[in-house]
Image (spheres, grey):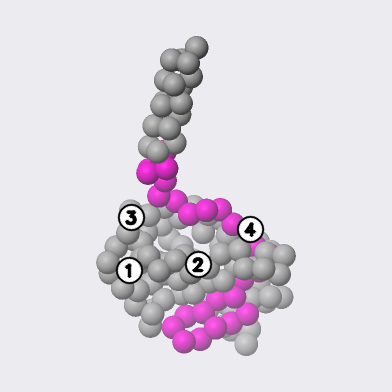
Amino acid sequence: MVRGLLSISIMLIMFLSVSGCTNNSVDHIKADYFDIGFGQSLYQGYEKVDKETVQSLVKAYNQIEFVGHTSQEINYDKAITITFIHNDQISGILVIDDKGIFQLNDDMNHYQIESDNEVYEQAIEIYNDVKKQY
């Protein structure tokens, strides 16, 4: 009995450690609206962006997968900053530049996004739409 429990415990620990190491995706968030900025500018999306656009950007965020950590710096002059708000609290922050280098929330680590992800291009379009409303 003890031997069986020990082997199950070892297998469980191995499974959890292996599955934790291969997770190269973001924690999923929800949002009611977002604020979006490019370079030094920042625009509030509250009541400026429809729910479909918010959910589209949330979906893009939730689908982010990354190659791993990188030592490359974010080019803040070309970076989009998105602050997602859910129930009047920040649910997530994404800073991503045109080369796919990004940072999440208050994490100081930089990551490289998968090359087939188009969240930056989508965010630029949304930023330009919000900017026109000001």
Which corner quadrant holds the C terminus? bottom right
Q: Which residue is mark 3?
A: 68
Residue 131 picture location, percent across and down: 57, 83
Q: Which residue is mark 1?
A: 99
Query: On the picture, is 3 further left or further right than 36?
Result: left
Q: Which residue is mark 2?
A: 105
Q: The disc labelled 4 sits on which kind of residue?
A: Lys
| Residue 117 vertical placement versus 101 (above, below) | above
| Residue stretch rendered in magenta on the structure | 19-44
Figure quadrant of residue 71:
bottom left
Q: Earlier in the sequence, mark 1 or mark 4?
A: 4
Which residue in the rendered view is the most extreme toward the left? 71
Residue 50 picture location, percent across and down: 68, 68
Q: Earlier in the sequence, mark 2 or mark 4?
A: 4
Q: Which residue is mark 4?
A: 30
Using a 10 Å C-alpha cutoff, classify the residue at mark 3 as few (fewer than 14 neighbours), some (14 to 19) or many (20 or more): some
Q: Nearer the viewer, residue 68 or 124?
A: 68
Check if mark 3's residue and mark 1's residue have beta carbons within 8 Å. Answer: no
For residue 37: magenta? yes
